[in-house]
Amino acid sequence: MGVLVSLFKQRGFIIFLNLSFLSVAACAFFAIRFHPPESYFHVLNKSSRRIHGSPQDDCRSFLGLTDFEAKCSVLKSSNPCNTQGYIDYLYIFYCQYGSFSILGYTLLFLWLLVLFYLLGNTASEYFCSSLESLSKVLNLSPTIAGVTLLSLGNGAPDVFASLVAFMGDGTSDIGLNTVLGGASFVTCVVVGIISILLRRRRIKVNRSGFIRDVLFFLLVLLSVFFILLHGHINLWGAIGFSSMYIVYVLAVYVSHAQWLSFRSDICEPLLKEPPKDEFEGVNESRYNDDNDDDNDDVRIDVYDLCFCPRLSPSCLVFLRILEIPLYLPRRLTIPAIAEENWSRPYAVASVILAPLLLSVLWAFHHQTDATQSNLIICVVALLLGISFGIVAFATTENSTPPKKCLFPWLAAGFTMSLTWSYILAQELVGLLVSLGYIMNISPSILGLTFLAWGNSLGDLVANVTMALNGGQRGAQIAISGCYAGPIFNTLFGLGMSLVGASWKKYPQSIAIPPDPYVMETLGLLVGGLLWALVALPRREMRLDAVLGGGLLAIYLTSLLLRLLQAFASSH
């Protein structure tokens, strides 16, 4: 009964989110209808087209304005503050709801809730499914899957955000703080939550792999410390720093090959069904078919309490309609061939619309190019999608998903799940940055908190879901990903950002501005790694509450410092 109640509460929550989305859309429609902007393109993010002056000076001058009408006047020409995402939330807040700020805050926070759900649901429903299937097709071990596919998927938003920040003018501190803040969140909060949730299952992680990952990450952070201490880095130094990730992947491969020689049973399925006794405290009826009749009665009672009486056909249709707004766009653009979710019409539609979505995204990021060129690209993408759709229709059946040539389907599903994660993460980050500007929070603290949380939400949901649903091997993948992901983000994301920025200044070095917040975060991050390095081996490599509680305490200490600093900076 507990499982069923939880399920229906989840469905009710999804309906609430869809209603929130519809409310936000309705309010936005009426606001634009009765208070139309001078151009509908004003609601799109224009932060790349700035007014004269440096970005920091422009943004500081904008934030110094006290009247919402004055801020709206500035925003009508361009957004002087560096906000990511596709919607100009500053324009919407100050120009559409300036005289009704409470309504503006309410809508922005409702939309924030919707974005958090969408990003998490995309990771759990689409990304993790693609990851598991790709791991099986490629015969990847849990450790290799954790340091490659999981790191790549979870790190895409962080890498993009870091590249944009470092390649922009005066925003490198945001990128640096975001990378380190995200690493601190993942290695402390995500590992801590996984350890606490799995404390009763007595799951062990691989000792050599864990120690290798933590020690290598400490070496990476030591390199970052010396870069910050020196204050400058040239192109060759940036290339050397980012190349450390190749060394890490080789180290993982070699250690895995050595371990493989001693383990002949490594070729078991990646995420095999965990034994029944691993789930202590879970309702026994999930594993016992003798209780089916009782479960049917419970199911009826729960529906009667939570939804329409007797679940009439019209009620079911109404509930399905409420779930459509947040479900349909992703379902129509992410190819999915899982047995439980197979639908031939959706599969054909997704391979047709996926290239079109990619072309629209490309056109948005190249707004300064000729409109005709963007239109041609979209038409070519549509024709390509129609060709894929014809092939998909001819090679699939209505009853079962395809059994052969799975890799193209899985690669497309993985790519589109990453694309949606990228879209949602950037929109979430853009909204968080805008809320920070509206509430007068410093950019450095934004990077360490809001941006880090937004970029790391995918890691939280994907790794926790993998750990809870994958048994012993799922927990190993999740823990490997919790350290391999930040290593990837730091070496590849931050490293390539440094390479790009130093390439623009070559042969000169680029300056790394001093920031006390970065050093504090670096110290607390090292403290969390050292705690895990000491606590886990002493607990016989079992994930438990001691490890998790210590990591969460370290992060809460860091968060308390950030809150005090944010309070001091706003007064």
Image (cartoon, grey):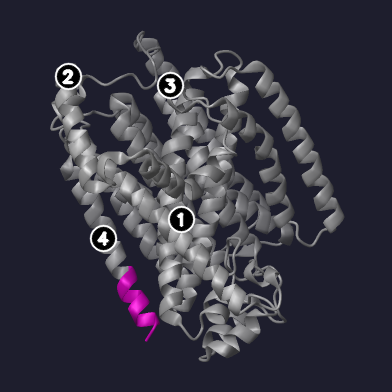
SS for tag 1? Answer: helix
Q: Residue 153 at x, y = what percent? A: 51, 39
N-terminal-most mark, 3 or 2: 3
Comparing marks 4 and 1, which lies closer to the viewer? 1
The correct choice, above or below, for 226 with respect to 35 in the image is above
> CB atoms at circles 1 and 2 under 8 Å apart?
no
Residues tagged 4 and 2 counted as in contact (Cβ below 8 A): no
State the mark number for residue 288. 2
- In 3D space, how far apart are the residues under numbered discs 3 and 1 (Cα atoms)? 32 Å
Name which residue type carries label 3: Ser
Q: Residue at x 65, y 52 (%)?
A: 499
In the rendered structure, which segment of residues is drawn in magenta? 562-571
Is residue 153 on the magenta stretch?
Answer: no
Dot 4 or dot 2: first in sequence order is: 2
Between label 3 and label 2, give the one nearer the viewer.
2
Task: Compute the Cα span from label 4 to label 1.
Answer: 24 Å
Residue 215 in view:
no
Considering only order in the chain, which callout, 1 or 3, is on the residue closer to the N terminus? 1
Residue at x 17%, y 31% (from the top left corner): 297
Q: Which residue is mark 3?
A: 141
Q: Which residue is painted at 26% across and 40% down in the image?
A: 310
Q: Secondary structure at mark 3?
A: loop
Q: Is residue 509 above or below residue 475?
A: below
Which residue does the image show at 85% across and 58% down from the upper left?
Answer: 370
Q: Nearer the viewer, residue 28 or 277?
A: 28
Q: Is residue 236 visible?
A: yes
Q: Are marks 3 and 2 in contact (CB under 8 Å)?
A: no
Q: Distance of mark 4 from mark 2, alpha carbons?
A: 41 Å
